[in-house]
Image (tube, coloured by chain):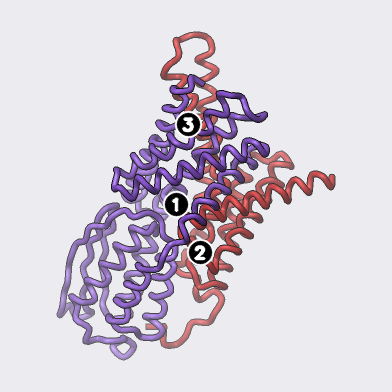
Chain colours: A purple, B red
Amino acid sequence: MEGNVNHNRVDVKEIGLVLLDIGAILMSSGANTTRIRTTISRISEAFGYSTELLVTHRAIMLSVTDSAHHSFFSSLKRTSPHGVNFKVVSGISRMSWRIVEEQWDVEQIKVELTRLESIPQYPRILILLLVSLAGSSFCRLFGGHVIEMGIVFIASFAGLLIRQETIKRNFNPYLCVYFGAVTASLISGLSVKLGWGSTPETALATSVLFLVPGVPLINIFIDLLDGNLMNGTLRGINGLIISFSIALGLLTAMIIYQI
Amino acid sequence: MTMEWWLLVEKGIWFGLASLGFAILFNVPPRTLLLIMVLALIGGMTREIMLHFGIHVILGTFAGATIIGLLSVWTSHLKHTPPLVFSIPAVIPMVPGVLAYRTMLGFIKLASEHIDTSVSQTLAETTSNGLKMTFILMALAVGVSVPMLISRKETFKYLFEPRKDSDKN
């Protein structure tokens, strides 16, 4: 056992803090509970420590021990909801294998974590255009035609823009979703009011779909199936509030236009 | 018949484009974008073919999501990226958005309407839409995690490459 271990002399506190960071980053980036657990124990085993972990929606608690129980570290870290970032999830997964196979030390892990967190997102205009195109595709899949698709494109573009701007100004995350939904449905609702296109209802229904919390919704069931009932339930309530924010946005536009 | 196949392919392309938008929104690594679109196209077309042959939408969605889930294991090996990075954006176009919209519309109606004969119809439609939506969401999530559920493995890394001696600690 001892011979296979990378660096048995790594301080338990040092590795514990790095593991906490990794767990918190994974939680904020949209990884499910089992993935966090697997990644953390894979890395800690590479350093010859065993880790027990408590993952909740907004905090992570872990205790690290060595095999002989000579050293022990236990700590708690709050996680902040940042939104989905699969580049980070994927990067940490790759890193965990390289830690095992290439016997990385803690410094290398810290450098890699800083690098992963500073990888830029896609250009903003590209995100806006492609998400709007996705909205139009949804509209087409649900039976819309060219006019409706165009309306959904404009509505999604404006809605996402407003959502990004409100997130930047540190509004409550659910309120950001609401603002996005109101903007999008005010634009697409106008086409329903004026009767443009052959199936204007499709435009209204699909213009807010870019706000659907896809990753949280799927993570709910993945967590529940893995037996992480508490995390699954918490994610479920989060998804429910987001869905209600979208609904409220739609409702606002429908009341304004009297549809 | 040829026209129908063309419509099927067209729908497949829209499935691909919808997943591309969400992949960008979820900030996936650029090397995975093309495969995500291909997975969404295959999964979406599977569902459309099953719907065409009169199979229920819940079962069709489950089949589509399962195929995406199984293929994502293989693509994750190709690109050294966790399977979920491929499978989640690829199943997003199958999310029952219009059903959710109709369910909500039904709720609003039920909350505002005066009690008359149309209430029971609204109630029946809303319940049906809401349940269908929930079951489709569950079908998506279970379908995506099928590979994990049937193999009971925490990693698929050793499925395609032999385990090295140094790993067995």
Image-based side of B74 in relation to A53, left or right: right
Q: Of helix, strand and loop, which one carries label 1?
A: helix
Q: Determine which residue is flagged by label 2.
A: B83
Image-based side of B98 in relation to A169, left or right: right
Where residue A173 sits: x, y (%)? 33, 44
Residue type at tag 1: Val
**Residue that appears at 41% across and 49% down:** A216
Which of label 3 and label 1 is nearer to you? 3
Q: Determine which residue is flagged by label 3.
A: A186
> Gap between marks 2 and 1, in whole Å?
13 Å
Which of label 2 and label 1 is nearer to you? 1
Q: Which quadrant, please, contains the N terminus of chain A?
A: bottom left
Image-based side of A74 in relation to B26, left or right: left
| Residue A122 seen in the figure | yes
Chain ID at mark 2: B
The residue at the far top in this view is B116
Q: Which numbered marker is on residue A215?
A: 1
**Residue that appears at 29% across and 52% down:** A57
Where residue A209 sits: x, y (%)? 51, 41
